[in-house]
Image: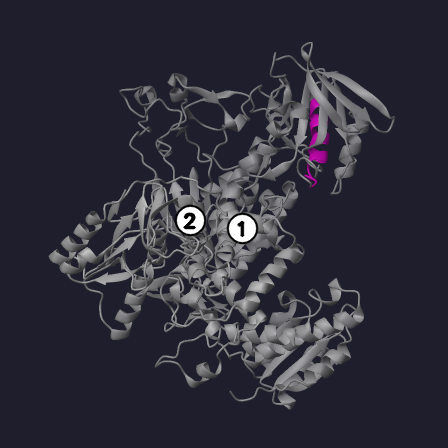
């Protein structure tokens, strides 16, 4: 069990000593139970930090934002940022480091182990609580304890946990500066890729029907892209202008923009968007699941990313976010790579 | 962008294209393209009149770019780019649309074939629309060559190159040059002694002022490209100074370590300190570090004590040497297919079942038995010997699919040699068919059958095993339709030639392709048989495909000629179709750096930078970049996009 006081003490201490300029963590949210990202800049604020099953967010996103803001202000990074990171979040940071997005010394990772649980799936919870609104969620061993108007309600975490957490085998941030909680790497609450496996058991026709249904509903709000730390490109290919316009951009270049994908939210364009995104996340997505959680129309986006993840693992033994130094999936070539598809 | 004036030239290629594609319609459709100012169709565009008409049309119509829709750019891209240049326009504004290999040859339906040809042609017209005029990049040439592998192929290639006055570095893994040929006894079809014809070449190579010989050395790393390679070589320590060594052999007499002798294919043993053969070059001993008791006078040190010449030095260390060369010949040779893969042939575990090379050593005067054919188990003269052809070859289901090519001939030779050594012995040969194409080869096989009284049985052997001190061979004679059972004193397997272990390793290091069987891949099976797919790297000998000595020598000579021709130029012109970074879009993620097979990209101040001398324009970087920050010139994203659009329209 993690004692929240440990995280608070670490944050307070680092801020007091001036070792970090900000601590990114979680605090009580403004809309009831769920936590929200917190940016703590003074030692006195450290007590705002919390750690509970609603700490969904992959906060490494804000490290990306920080870099973008610094670039915009033409400022050097100065002292590092401390960040509270779960296993998957820490792996995202590793991918960002692998891609030289910032330097290891720019970030101080306060690792938190999800131990035997993970984050909550609010939809699963809603069906369990029959309309009762919880105001607070807390970890208690392998259970979650919810505070509701009708008193305390205890549920086994497995029944209301997010799918991605059930399938996660490495609920521990291997890359960290300090870490809290027990390392339960190798735990298996559900088969990895269980949803994908179930989905793939169906015929081509059924699968196409399901995806057509989802692709039709995508309204291209780009919440998935906005919430993803890996979607850090200055200009996304789907913005259909491809190249950011800078002072060096010539008139010819502006005229020569490639329109790979139309902006309109039509099935064909939505397919191209979602599949391109999946491709661009191959070997980079650490399955933090934020894209799927953020989707307002419940498109199972994780399944696309999972598909790439499983291919990479099975065919190339590649685990995203495993090491900072290794080359990324699409840029590495091994002599024993299966090349049979090419013949 | 000002509008281009493109000329489109549609080739019939006789009926090669015209039979499946309505060429007139392709030309007509292309005329409808905005940028196209001229179209023409002709029966053979690559013929002299065809080429002249292209040049004339460019001049007459003030064309600034051309598209030739014909065969693969592998064949005539250069022809037509040269023509463009002749006509006074930039050669890189000429592109080929391949409507033969990628269209007419693979389709039967003329209507659909024509549609596809139109799409292919249109996409290339759109691409050319955005082609930039480019100038070739001139690079200096390092006038030195490297030959990897010191067998007959490597020796011949090195000698031919050196005799043209070009310095050659020959790198050999083993302690001596000579390779497989030095292990052979006599050679078909003339039965001249292998070592006798090879050793003069070895001596010539050793003494050649233009040859730098590096034995007991391995290539570790390759950088650079055609004209300018940088090769890292590991020189393993032999612990013996060849200049001091007097070949007295005292050291082997005192060495207490006995290990199988790989140079005698494990028929005999050697000591930890050894010389492979009497004819070894360099003529010196080698101390095998992996079996020596410890390179330390405290542990053993007997050889050092006994060496009067003081040639043994335990302090030698591995050395890494860097050599700059302009061209490389790979001649890393073959191994035999592993008997362990063939349980039906005893899996290498049945006594007196030998492979072809072991039999060569038995026949060889310098071999373990002093040139007497004695079977290993009891050192008696075998009176019944069964030779089995096609062992592991021509067996796509279980082993190698290909024909190993030389086994028919060397089996016939083995049978003859056996009969010469043991005139009262009986030789049987199991064969599938006899492939004896070659000068004097068929006559040689006939002599084996008739003059040397060898019994040829057409059929495969199903099993062999030890039985009463002999090897029982169960087979079929398909001509008489009977099962055959022979109790043989010795069995010799004509195992398939496979690429040597070194070949597999070197292909990875040099990043040159291999074919489905693991042999080194040639750039074109007919027209570029001695060139690898990588510029400046050439192939010779059995590393490329199974072949006999005359063929190997011929290929080595051909590879040498290619090297000499390449290195006779003072500068090389490299195509300017290389990668270009848009720094404003580069986030410095470094994926392209990892993806580049030519080590041509590095990160500097958080941005990717392309080394123009190394980039081959393969496009791996462009395909890897998620941000479209790196493009290959004249194959930009926008061009690809418009090509796709043209195909889908």
Q: Which residue in the rendered view is the most extreme toward the top? A: B468
Q: What SS does tag 1 mark? A: helix
Vertical arrangement, residue B376 with respect to residue B648, above or below: above
Q: Which residues are magenta?
A: B402-418
Q: Is residue B408 magenta?
A: yes
Counting every numbered tag in the picture gives 2
Q: Residue furthest right?
A: B480
Task: Identify the secondary structure beneath mark 2.
Answer: helix
Residue B70, given in percent of the width and then of the height, sits at: 69, 72
Mark 1 and mark 2: span between their CA atoms? 19 Å
Contact (CB < 8 A) between labels 1 and 2?
Answer: no
Whether A185 is drawn above or below A291: the answer is above
Main secondary structure type of the part rendered in magenta: helix
Colour scheme shown? one colour
Disc number at residue B460? none
The residue tagged 2 is: A160
> Which chain's residue wears label 2?
A
Could you classify mark 2 by the number of other residues whose Cα lies within 10 Å: few (under 14), some (14-19), or many (20 or more)?
many
Give residue A196's mark. 1
Question: Is A218 in front, or is B54?
Answer: A218
Q: Residue at point 30% right, 40% down?
A: A182
The tag earlier along the polypeptide, 1 or 2, is 2
Where is residue A77, by image quadrant? bottom left
Residue B59 placement: quadrant: bottom right
Crowd rating for badge 1 (residues with CA inside 10 Å; few <14, some 14–19, many 20+): some
| Labels 1, 2: one chain | yes
Residue B339 located left or right of residue A128: right
**Label 1 marks which chain's residue?**
A
Residue farthest toward the left in the current orientation of the protein: A17
Front-lying residue, B265 or A188: A188
* Residue B145 picture location, percent across and down: 47, 53
In the drawing, does residue B238 fall left or right of residue B635? Answer: left
């Amino acid at each position: 069990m993690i004692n929240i006081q440990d995280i608070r003490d670490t944050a307070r201490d680092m801020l007091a000593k001036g070792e970090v300029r900000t601590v990114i963590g979680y605090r009580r949210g403004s809309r009831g139970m769920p936590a929200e990202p917190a940016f703590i800049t003074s030692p006195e604020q450290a007590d705002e930090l919390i750690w509970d099953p609603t700490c969904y967010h992959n906060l490494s996103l804000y490290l990306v934002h920080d870099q973008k803001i610094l670039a915009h202000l033409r400022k050097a990074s100065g002292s590092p940022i401390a960040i509270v990171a779960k296993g998957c979040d820490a792996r995202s940071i590793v991918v960002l480091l692998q891609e030289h997005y910032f330097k290891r010394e720019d970030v101080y990772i306060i690792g938190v182990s999800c131990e035997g649980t993970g984050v909550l799936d609010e939809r699963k919870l809603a069906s369990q609580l029959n309309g009762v609104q919880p105001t607070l969620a807390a970890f208690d061993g392998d259970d979650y304890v919810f505070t509701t108007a009708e008193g305390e309600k205890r549920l086994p975490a497995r029944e209301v946990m997010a799918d991605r957490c059930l399938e996660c085998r490495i609920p521990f941030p291997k890359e960290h500066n300090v870490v809290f909680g027990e390392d339960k790497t190798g735990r298996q609450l559900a088969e990895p890729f269980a949803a994908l496996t179930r989905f793939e058991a169906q015929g081509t026709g059924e699968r196409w029907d399901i995806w057509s249904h989802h692709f039709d509903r995508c309204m291209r709000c780009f919440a998935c892209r906005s919430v993803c730390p890996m979607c850090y490109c200055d200009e996304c290919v789907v913005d259909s202008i491809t190249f950011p316009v800078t002072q060096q951009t010539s008139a010819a270049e502006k005229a020569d923009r490639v329109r790979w994908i139309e902006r309109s939210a039509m099935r064909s364009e939505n397919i191209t968007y979602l599949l391109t995104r999946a491709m661009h996340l191959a070997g980079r997505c650490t399955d933090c699941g934020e894209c799927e959680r953020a989707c307002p129309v419940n498109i199972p986006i994780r399944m696309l990313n999972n598909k790439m993840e499983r291919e990479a693992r099975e065919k190339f033994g590649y685990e995203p976010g495993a090491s900072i130094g290794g080359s990324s999936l699409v840029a590495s070539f091994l002599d024993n790579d299966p090349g049979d598809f090419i013949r | 962008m000002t509008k281009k004036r493109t000329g489109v030239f549609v080739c019939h290629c006789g009926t090669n294209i015209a039979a499946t594609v309505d060429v007139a319609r392709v030309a007509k459709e292309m005329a409808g393209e905005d940028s196209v100012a001229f179209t023409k169709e002709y029966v053979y565009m690559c013929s002299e009149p065809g080429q002249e008409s292209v040049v004339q049309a460019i001049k007459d119509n003030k064309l600034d770019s051309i598209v030739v829709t014909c065969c693969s750019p592998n064949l005539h891209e250069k022809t037509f780019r040269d023509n463009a240049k002749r006509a006074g326009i930039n050669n890189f504004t000429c592109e080929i649309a391949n409507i033969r290999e990628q269209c007419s040859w693979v389709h039967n339906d003329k209507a659909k074939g024509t549609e596809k040809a139109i799409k292919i042609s249109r996409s290339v017209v759109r691409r050319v629309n955005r082609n930039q005029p480019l100038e070739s990049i001139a690079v200096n040439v390092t006038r030195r060559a490297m030959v990897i592998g010191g067998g007959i192929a490597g020796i011949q290639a090195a000698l031919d190159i050196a005799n043209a006055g070009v310095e050659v570095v020959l790198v050999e893994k083993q302690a001596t040059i000579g390779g497989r040929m030095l292990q052979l006894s006599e050679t078909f079809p003339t039965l001249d002694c292998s070592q006798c014809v090879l050793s003069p070449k070895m001596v010539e190579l050793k003494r050649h002022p233009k040859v730098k010989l590096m034995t007991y050395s391995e290539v570790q790393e390759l950088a650079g490209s055609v004209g300018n390679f940088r090769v890292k070589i590991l020189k393993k320590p032999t612990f013996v100074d060849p200049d001091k060594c007097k070949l007295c052999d005292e050291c082997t007499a005192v060495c207490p370590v006995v290990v199988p002798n790989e140079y005698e294919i494990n028929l005999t043993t050697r000591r930890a300190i050894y010389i492979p053969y009497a004819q070894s070059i360099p003529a010196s001993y080698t101390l095998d570090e992996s079996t020596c008791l410890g390179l330390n006078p405290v542990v053993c040190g007997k050889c050092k004590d006994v060496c009067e010449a003081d040639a043994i030095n335990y302090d030698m260390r591995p050395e890494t040497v860097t050599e700059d060369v302009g061209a490389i010949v790979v001649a890393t040779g073959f191994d035999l297919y592993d008997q362990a893969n063939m349980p039906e042939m005893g899996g290498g575990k049945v006594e007196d079942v030998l492979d072809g090379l072991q039999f060569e050593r038995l026949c060889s005067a310098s071999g373990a038995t002093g040139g007497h054919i004695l079977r290993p188990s009891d050192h008696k003269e075998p009176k019944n010997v069964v030779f089995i052809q096609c062992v592991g070859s021509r067996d796509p289901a279980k082993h190698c699919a290909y024909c190993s090519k030389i086994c028919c001939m060397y089996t016939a030779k083995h049978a003859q040699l056996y009969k010469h050594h043991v005139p009262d012995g009986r030789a049987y040969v199991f064969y599938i068919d006899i492939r004896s194409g070659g000068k004097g080869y068929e006559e040689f096989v006939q002599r084996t059958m008739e003059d040397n009284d060898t019994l040829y049985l057409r059929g495969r052997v199903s099993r062999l095993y030890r039985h009463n001190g002999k090897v029982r061979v169960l087979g079929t004679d398909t001509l008489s339709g009977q099962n055959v059972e022979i109790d043989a004193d010795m069995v010799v397997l004509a195992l398939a030639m496979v690429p040597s272990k070194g070949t597999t390793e070197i292909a990875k290091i040099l990043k040159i392709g291999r074919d489905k069987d693991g042999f080194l891949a040639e750039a074109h099976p007919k027209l570029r048989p001695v060139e690898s797919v990588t510029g400046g790297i050439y192939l010779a000998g059995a590393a490329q495909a199974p072949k006999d000595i005359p063929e190997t020598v011929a290929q080595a000579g051909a590879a040498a000629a290619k090297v000499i021709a390449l290195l006779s130029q003072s500068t090389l012109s490299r195509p300017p179709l290389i990668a270009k970074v848009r720094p404003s879009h580069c986030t410095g993620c470094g994926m392209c750096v990892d993806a580049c097979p030519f080590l041509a990209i590095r990160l500097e101040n958080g941005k990717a930078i392309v080394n123009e001398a190394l980039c081959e324009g393969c496009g791996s970087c462009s395909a890897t970049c998620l941000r479209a920050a790196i493009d290959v010139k004249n194959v930009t994203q926008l061009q690809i996009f418009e090509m796709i659009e043209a195909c889908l329209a």
